[in-house]
Image: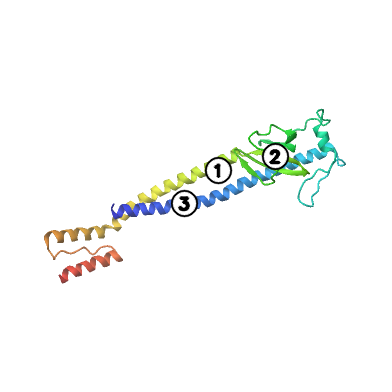
Amino acid sequence: MSLRLRLALLIAVAIALALLVQGFLGYASFERLQMGNLERELNAYLSRIVDQLEGRRGPHMFRRDRGNDQTRFLSPHLVEQLRLYNNPLPPLPNPALPGTIAHARLFQEGVVLREWGSFPAEIPQSNRRETRLEQNWLYRSVHLRAGLYLQGAIEASQVRASLAGYQQTVLFTALLVALLGALVAWVLSGPALRPLRHLQETIRRVADSGDLSLRVPAEGSGELLHLSQTFNQMLGRL
């Protein structure tokens, strides 16, 4: 492999690595932004459901305890009334915003008491408050009272598609710019390495003919010029 080709490949690899590192950092920031927005939408969706239930049941049936940053239903008859087959409450509308797909369910001890929309079957019942990503759904649960949880899920397919598109853009850009950098390095390294080629040709001619009167043209600058002058001085001494 020639020095010129090695130089072009080295520059291409350096450019690709620099762009990949920058793209990775940008992707991490973009992912945090997108998932943060989606998480805020999910929290707002669950908050609207809680407000909806409060409005339906009335302020004397339950209240929210905001001292520990949790929403708790304190009505002692809430679960019993929700378990009734003929629930006195009419069906509650799903308060998902237009353009978003979100579902929720109220459950206790594995029994679903009420659903908003058609809750995804692939999401398990969980009492974890941390947001989790399951396939194309972002979900979390809110503790309402002892053993009673409100679980919400919002579709994340558009966010994941945006992240996948971002990844593809970063990879394509890194590959394209690296190839362009290698091409530019190949073109520019030709004149820069011309003194080295002349030195190589002169050495070969001296080795073949034994003519010590041959000289290397004083071209280039820096180390290449110094190498040519040193080689000419060596031939003069010989």
Give residue 180's position: percent from left, percent from top.
39, 48
Badge 2 density bin: few <14, some 14–19, many ≥20, Cα 10 Å: many
Mark 1 is surrounded, within 10 Å at the Cα level, by few (under 14), some (14 to 19) or many (20 or more) other residues, namely some
Coordinates of residue 24 in the picture (x, y in percent): 51, 50
- In this view, the residue in front, 108 or 200, is 108
Q: Nearer the viewer, residue 43 or 124?
A: 124
Q: Earlier in the sequence, mark 2 or mark 1?
A: 2
Query: Colour scheme used in the picture?
Result: rainbow
Residue type at mark 1: give it.
Leu
Earlier residue among tags 2 and 3: 3
- Residue 193 sits in which quadrant? bottom left
Q: Nearer the viewer, residue 45 or 186?
A: 45
Left or right, 221 with respect to 35, comes to left
> Callout 3: few (<14), some (14-19), or many (20+) C-alpha neighbours within 10 Å?
some
Question: Relative to residue 153, is residue 15 drawn left or right?
Answer: left
Q: Which residue is mark 3?
A: 19
Circle 1 SS class: helix
| Circle 3: residue type | Leu
Label drawn at residue 163: 1
